[in-house]
Amino acid sequence: MVKILGLDPSLSSTGWGVIEAKDNRLKYLGDGFIKTDPKKTIEERLALLYKSLCQVIDLYEPEEAAIEEIFLNENPMSTIKLAQARGVVILSVAMHNLPLSEYEPRKVKKALVGTGSALKTQVETMVKVLLPSCQPKNNDSSDALAIAITHAHYRTSKKNNDVAV
């Protein structure tokens, strides 16, 4: 049995979700999002993100974490803000010595829905099907739970691929 923290980074609202996985069984433990005030300075927003994520990690004590790979926006400033938030999210995980895996958005969609071009609503529906006691707080926490579920599906094959033969 392993506790997995899924993370969907964003400067405006970072989603998080925690599940427990044992073989093919999944159990919902918690989810939420960390919203930052756009009127605050970038350093205040990033500090809030870091402190809040550390509290989540301390509370749930996950053993592994997973994050969505970065994608490029058409707006360069949006991409930079996303990268800054993602760096803080990765730092939070690293400071707790958690192994971190990354998954591209299409892989997350394919793992949950069966197609890499699935809609957000389809992903959220599958999160609720796979975690019946879960009602995600918003799209960000739903995406974070989807990332955690993806990691639960792929983690054993990743470990087997990491073993030198």
Image (cartoon, grey):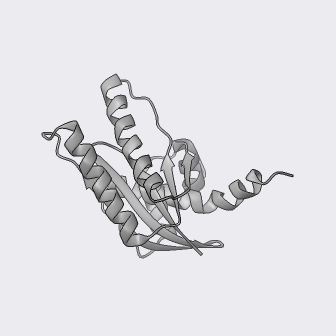
Relative to 110, 76 lies left or right: left
Residue at (42% x, 48% y) in the render: 91
Viewer-proximal residue, 76 or 43? 43
Relative to 66, 92 lies left or right: left
Q: Residue 128's spot in the image, x, y percent? A: 44, 67
Viewer-proximal residue, 46 or 3? 46
Residue at (44% x, 29% y) in the render: 72
Vertical relation: 139 (above or below) 56? above
Viewer-proximal residue, 142 or 95? 95
Residue at (48% x, 57% y) in the render: 146
Vertical relation: 102 (above or below) 59? above
Q: Residue 57's spot in the image, x, y percent? A: 40, 64
Viewer-proximal residue, 12 or 139? 12
Q: Quadrant of residue 125?
A: bottom left
Q: Residue 112's spot in the image, x, y percent? A: 55, 56
Relative to 75, 28 lies left or right: right
